[in-house]
Image (tube, rainbow, N blue to C red):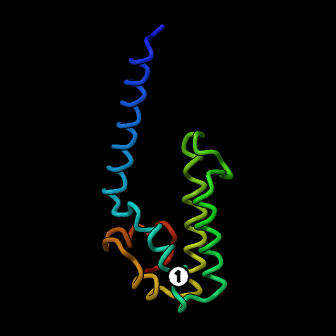
Amino acid sequence: MRPASSKRRSSAAANISSSSATIALSSSSGLSYSPLRLLRRLAADANVPRAARVRLMLLLGYLAIPLDLVPDFVPVLGYADDAIIVSLVLRSVVRRAGAPLVRRHWPGTHDGLDALARLTGMPL
């Protein structure tokens, strides 16, 4: 049996390595937290149609609640459900509000916006 201190160290090392992988993935794609800021900005904009703003607010609520359709501890699928739901809601918002409005509110890089366009399947 391992002492508690070595368990903590191995757990901390696993957390650091998974965090590093997440940071590397998000910085390489240019996405990081930009989609969340985009959702918040679009939900607050009065130029976005009301139905789209309601969808955005419901999505933000869904993302804030720790309960998911598929729990996050399930490999791959745990995080994929969040990405799929965000993609579907953003796609419907782009259709209602228009790509120029989404481009205006996008806080990230051009590469990140291109990645978001590929993810949602919409020309931005």
Between 35 and 122, the one lying in front of the other is: 35
Quarter of the image for the C terminus: give it.
Answer: bottom left
Q: Is residue 30 left or right of residue 61?
A: left
- Residue 26, image x, y percentages: 36, 56
- Residue 57, image x, y percentages: 61, 73
Q: Residue at x 43, y 20 (%)?
A: 7
Q: Is residue 35 left or right of residue 9?
A: right
Question: Three-letter amino acid code at disc 1?
Answer: Ala
Badge 1: few (under 14), some or many (20 or more) residues near its Cα, within 10 Å? few
In the orientation shown, which residue stands out farthest toward the top? 1
- Residue 122, image x, y percentages: 50, 77
Q: Residue at x 31, y 71 (%)?
A: 109
In the figure, residue 4 lies in which quadrant?
top left
In the figure, residue 108 lies in which quadrant?
bottom left
Above or below 22: residue 57: below
Q: Residue at x 58, y 60 (%)?
A: 63
Count of marks, rendered view: 1
Above or below 5: residue 83: below
In the orientation shown, which residue stands out farthest toward the front? 5
Q: Residue at x 61, y 68 (%)?
A: 59
Which element is circle 1 on? helix
- Residue 83, image x, y percentages: 54, 59
Instruction: Provide the residue designation for mark 1.
Output: 44
In the figure, residue 82 lies in which quadrant?
bottom right
Above or below 70: residue 123: below
